[in-house]
Amino acid sequence: QLYSQAAAQARIFRVLLYAAAVLLAGYIGYLFVQLGVRARDLQARLNLENIVAEISGRFINLAPAQIRDEVHVSLGRLARHVGAQRAHIVLYTTSGNAIETAYRWQEPGTTAGKPDEDGVDTVVQSWNLPRYEHRGCISVASVRSLPDSPEKRHLQSRGICSWLCVFISLGGARAGFLALDTLSVERHWAAED
């Protein structure tokens, strides 16, 4: 009888050990999947940082007459990398109440909406949807999902599906912004972007 009790307990412990091993194997599998996701995220971030470093390097010995063309090329490179079809850089005057310089790149063959910097600036200056602002950015994954507002109408009139606006600061004051537009598909902009 002691032998049968010991054998029954051994079976129970074998089942428990098997269940623990299955759970442990499942958890290890989950960790490997998470590791792969994080490795892809880190690789994407590294690729973006490499592009920014390469773009910065191209401006080091650039003649003033070549700056506008290089900004245009660089905007295109950055926009394509993040999946945007249009990009704007708008810089304000030192007083901050007017546009001093504006650069725009649009993917060739793209005709969606009206790509004017004054219109983009109007959206930025009058933005009144704080839910979409985070750490110096305005991130809208789906313009059509915005609440009915002047911001939504303005972005839709320009054919924008998703929109990311990154503020440029100088000495703590807003000096301008970089805006990236997707025109054909919606894109979720991760906080790391």
Image (spheres, rainbow, N blue to C red):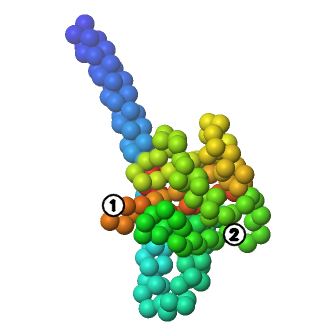
> Who is closer to the viewer here, 98 or 109?
98
Q: Secondary structure at mark 2?
A: loop
At x 57% / y 82%, what residue is drawn?
Answer: 68
The amino acid type found where label 2 is placed reads Glu
| Picture coordinates of residue 41, whole percent (x, y) | 45, 57
At x 39% / y 45%, what residue is drawn?
Answer: 31
| Picture coordinates of residue 90, whole percent (x, y) | 53, 67
Mark 1 Cα-neighbour bin, 10 Å: few <14, some 14–19, many ≥20: few
The amino acid type found where label 1 is placed reads Gly
Residue bearing mark 2 = 107
Mark 2 Cα-neighbour bin, 10 Å: few <14, some 14–19, many ≥20: some
**Residue extending furthest left?**
2
Does residue 132 appear in the picture of this structure?
yes
Q: Which mark is residue 81?
A: none
Q: Which mark is residue 172?
A: 1
Q: Is residue 71 above or below residue 96?
A: below
Does residue 38 appear in the picture of this structure?
no
Label whose residue precedes the other's in the sequence (1 or 2): 2
